[in-house]
Structures are given as C-alpha cells and as structure tokens.
Amino acid sequence: MIVLGVESSCDETGIALYDGKRGLLAHAIHSQIDTHKIWGGVVPELASRDHIRWFLPLLTEVLSQASLHKKDIDAVAYTFGPGLIGALLTGACFAKSFAYGLGIPSFAVHHLEGHILACMLDNPKLSFPFLALLVSGGHSEFIWAESLGNYKILGSTLDDAVGEAFDKTAKLMGIPYPGGAELACLADSVQSTPYRFPRPMLDRPGLDLSFSGLKTHAVNVWQKSSKTESDKQHIAHAFQEAVVETLIQKATRALDQTGGIQLVVAGGVGANQTLRKRFQNVMSERNGEVFFPRHEFCTDNGAMIAYAGFLHLDNGKKDVDHAVYVKPRLPIDY
Ligand code: KG4
Ligand code: ZN
C-alpha cells in the first residue's frame, strides 16, 4: 500500500510517499521561515496561504522522486491536529479532496503520534511499548506508548514548551527568528560557563515540566551582563545545560516509574546535539536504548504522517466520511 502523507499543522508544508513494502519512497518539505521572519513569529493567516501554494508543487516533486503517478497512490494520510486551525484546514481539505477525486481512503493522523513514530522509520529495532519524550515548539511531554494509537500522558509542561523556551530566550537575546537552533549552536561553541541556572521542577515529585521561569532567568542574566558575544555564548550554554539536565533527570524518573528500557526522544528539540549525546550516555549506563528520528524528521515533515497513516490504514482504520474535521487542541490520549 502506497500512502501519501500531508503535513500542514504549523509553518512547514510536508508531503511524502510511504510504501508498506519498500518503506519511505520520497519526501519534500517547504519551510516558511522566510515568510514569517520579518514578523518575528508565525503569522497564522500567512501560514495557511503559503501551505496552499506548496501542496501541488511538493506533490509533483515527490511523485517524480519516486517515479510514480498519482494513480499509484492507495490512500492519503493528513494531520488533523493539534496545530493552527487555518493551516490544518488547508492540509485536511487538500488531502480529503485528493482522496475523494481518486476514490481512495483517507486517514486523519494525530500530529504528535506522527512525531513519535518518526523514530520507527529508521529504527527497525524500536517496538511498542516504550517511553517517549516529545520536545517540540508547541509541546513538551512524557508519553507512555503502549501500542499503536494507545498513548498515556505521564507529565507535560505547565507553561512554555522546550522549543518555545529556546526560541523566546533567543529572541530576547537578539538572535533572529527562529532562534532555537542558533541558541543551541552558541551553547555548543563554549565548553563551560561561569553561570549555573536553576533546574526547574526537579525538587517536585512527578513528571511535569516548566520552562518559562528558566527563560526569564536567562533573559535577566543577559540584561545585567555586558552583552558581549562571550556573554551570549555562556548564557546560552547555561540555559541549554539546565534544559538538558532537567529533561534527563525527569526522563530517568519516568523510566524508573514505568520500567521502560526504550526511550524515544522526538520533536524539533530532539535535533539538539548535546541532548542527543547526554541521553545516549545515560541510556547506555542503564542498559537501555534511546532512539531519535533522523535529523530532518525531528521537525515537522510529511514522512512521519505518511508512515503513521500507513500503520493505521494497514490496521483497517480510515476516515468515516468525506467531511473535513480538524482539531487545533488535541491531546495525544484523546
Ligand atoms: O517539532 P517542531 O517542528 O515544532 C512543533 O511541531 O511544535 O520543532 C520546532 C522547535 C522550535 O522551537 C525550534 O527552536 C526547536 O524545535 N529546535 C531546537 C533545535 N532545532 C530545532 N531546539 C534546540 N536545539 C536545536 N538544535
Ligand atoms: Zn510538530
């Protein structure tokens, strides 16, 4: 079965083709960074309009990469939530009308399930059940993944998501949008820092997280500093250290609590090199294993939606009718 994946929940248009026999055949992503840069953040209406411009060119591109015709596609999977309502609607309308036109089934995929399952695209060893740490621009949560479609939220952020805290801290330190990855580069450009930032929520039981106070702390230190390049590097380093150590301590707690030996770290912040190295060390000390998605599949992409959609469609699931439903707010255990 060949599944077309359509992702449009925020500011990346992702289209991909996944084949149950041959695996991922092709994928293409259009990032809207240039569209939103001058506004310093994602403008929802501009995001929706840009998605509409890119669905067909990206579809043509993936069909050509895979040497396929649209009639070779057996089903369509698309993101139905969570995300920006207008952006979600463009993808859902495109996907459902495309499926209707071809007389093939469609399936609505949960965006966060897509992020978690993206790890399986390149890691055949990974199997249910496992613990997932989802760290993206909009979400930060620990999820127990029992089986396909069966997830339990164990803890989540009470305020900012990790990626959001990276981006906002970067912005307040004058780093151009989207600053998260650039802040991480600055952090990695020095080996140590004179600053030690607080590790939020570690003194409290449970698996909830909080990053808003850490962001404020970093910005206050920046405001009081001489604002040199070296200050920026050291503050970025201290911020990243606090984030990574907090996530590791909480993940260790979650693994102890669940007895899990496999950990998936997914979402945009999963691209962070320091986070990856530390988790690899910790999991090998525990005789466990940590899995990350391929770098380009940490942030939003169509491949994860095509793959998650394939798994559900292969299990006999499909949309019940042709109506378009999207859900801007949608927990993974809905
Ligand atoms: O998964 P994603 O596309 O967002 C949501 O679906 O919400 O991830 C984007 C987030 C942004 O906040 C970005 O700053 C962050 O991932 N990010 C990073 C890095 N690369 C991307 N954060 C820390 N270190 C990185 N290397
Ligand atoms: Zn995402």
Image (tube, grey):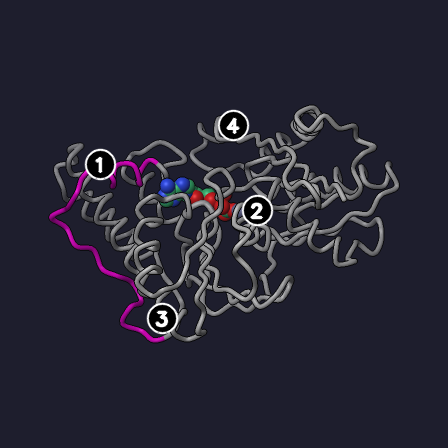
Q: Nearer the viewer, mark 1 or mark 2?
A: 2
* Pointer 2 residue Cβ closer than 8 Å to ligand 1: no
In which quarter of the view is residue 176 placed? top left
Q: Say if mark 4 contacts mark 2, CB within 8 Å.
A: no
Which residue occupies the foreground of this view, 23 or 236?
A: 23
Q: Which residue is mark 2?
A: 121
Write down the region rendered in magenta. Answer: 182-205
**Amino acid marked by disc 3:** Arg
**Amino acid marked by disc 2:** Leu
Q: Earlier in the sequence, mark 4 or mark 3?
A: 4
* Pointer 4 residue Cβ closer than 8 Å to ligand 1: no
User: Circle 3 sits in a helix, a strand or a loop, which is it?
Assistant: helix
Residue 106, image x and y in percent? 78, 47
193 drawn magenta: yes
Q: Which residue is mark 3?
A: 253
Q: Nearer the viewer, mark 4 or mark 2?
A: 2
Q: CA distance from mark 3 to mark 2?
A: 27 Å
User: Circle 1 sits in a helix, a strand or a loop, which is it?
Assistant: loop
Q: Which residue is mark 1?
A: 189
Q: Is the residue marked by circle 1 packed among few (<14), some (14-19), or many (20+) residues within 10 Å?
A: some
Q: Which residue is mark 4?
A: 35
Q: Is the residue marked by circle 2 packed among few (<14), some (14-19), or many (20+) residues within 10 Å?
A: some
